[in-house]
Structure formats: structure tokens, C-alpha cells
Amino acid sequence: MKLSNLVYLAITCASVSGAVITSSGYKVPEDLLTYLDCPIGDTPCKNEKKALCLDSLSFNICKNGNAENLESLLVDSGAVLEDYTPTEYCKIQNQVCNMIENYNPPLTRDYIFDVENYLTCDEDDNSCKESKNATCRLVTKMCWGNYPKTSCRKLSQTCDKIGYVEPAVEEN
């Protein structure tokens, strides 16, 4: 079995249980899942979520708060600690902020077969097109060898129709 298939299987199993797990084995609390809700491969979305995570009130409380009033500060900021201690919650939030760039939700059939979803951007919305293009291209790579070739080919052709144009690089 290919390594990519094993990774996909592991992510699918974790997701089927409804939980996203950090590198140290913690289940990500519900209130932190919002940082991990970008589509597969959507780099602009992930960059935005990482910036939001690192700039969040709870992240700054974890970074700067003292242990004696950490719990009350976190709760007052809207953090939902669930069954975690304040220290565990802070460790999880730090891990979540660090995993945003590399985390992708499970590959579902919609990513492969709902090709019209990739073509929903306004003609002049290059930011939307960049996001859809990034997702489409990565999903196409994941498709090959795991789904019928005709479906992967159709998806690849859809990626070409998105119309994303790389911004010109200015030379000095």
C-alpha cells in the first residue's frame, strides 16, 4: 500500500470518529476546530487561519498568562476547555496553530465528483480562483491511483477551467 494511501486511511479513521487529533494525541476541542476547516490544499485559507490562530486572544493568554489565573482568563476569553486543564488546552492550541498549514480534511467523494464546486468564483475574483485552484490541483494528485482515471481526468480538466492566473512577479 502506498504511503499516501496509509496517510489517507489514518486521517479518514480519525475523522470518521469525529475527532481531529494533534501530534501528541490530544483530541482538538470544538472551539479550536475552526482553525482547521479550510478545504484541502487551500493555502490562502490556511495562511489566514494561522494568522487568526496566532493572534487570537486565547493564544495570547496562553503565551503570556500566569498559571494562577490561566483558567479564568481562558474561560473569560471564550475558550471552551472541555475536559482539559488550562495547561493542556494551551498546549493543544499551540499544536493546532502549528498544524494548520499541513492539515487537510479527509478526501471525500465531493472533492472528486462535485467538479462544479471548483467553478463558483466570480470572473474577477483572483483570490477565490487561487483557493479553488490550489484545492483542485492537490485533490487531483490525491485522486490518481485511488479513484477511476476518468474521474481524475475530468477533475484535472476542471482545474484548467478555473482560470487562475499567477500574479506577475515584479523585477527590481
Image: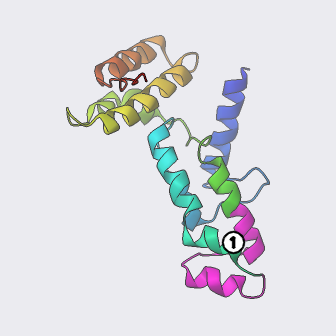
Image quadrant where one finds the C terminus = top left
Counting other residues with Cα less than 10 Å from the Cα at mark 1, is it few (<14), some (14-19), or many (20 or more)?
Answer: many
Q: What is the secondary structure assignment of the residue under circle 1?
A: helix
Residue 8 falls left or right of residue 40: right
Location of residue 166 in the rendering, given as x and y in whole percent from the top left corner: 37, 24
Name the residue nearer the viewer: 36 or 50: 50
Q: Is residue 74 above or below residue 157?
A: below
Which image quarter: residue 153? top left
Q: Residue furthest left?
A: 123
Amino acid found under the numbered disc labelled 1:
Cys
Q: Residue at x 51, y 46 (%)?
A: 47
Residue 165 point in image, percent of width and height: 32, 23
In the picture of the structure, the residue carrying the numbered disc 1 is 62
Residue 88 lies in the magenta stretch:
yes
Residue at image location 34% in from the left, 28% down from the top: 115
In the picture shown, does residue 151 fall above or below 86?
A: above
Residue range corresponding to the magenta coloring: 67-92
Q: Is residue 165 left or right of residue 124?
A: right
Q: Residue at 49% x, 36% y: name it.
A: 108
Q: At 73% across and 76% down in the image, what residue appears? A: 86
Q: Quadrant of the N terminus?
A: top right
Task: Please state which of residues 58 and 55 is positioned toward the viewer in this rendering.
Answer: 55
Q: Image check: 164 left or right of 2? A: left
- Horizontal side of residue 160 vs 54, given as left or right: left
Question: Percent x, y for residue 34?
Answer: 51, 59
Location of residue 80 with respect to 6 vertically, above or below: below
Residue toward you, 40 or 107: 40
Q: Any magenta on residue 167?
A: no
Count of numbered tags: 1
Quarter of the figure with residue 89: bottom right
Residue 64 screen position, x and y as percent: 69, 74
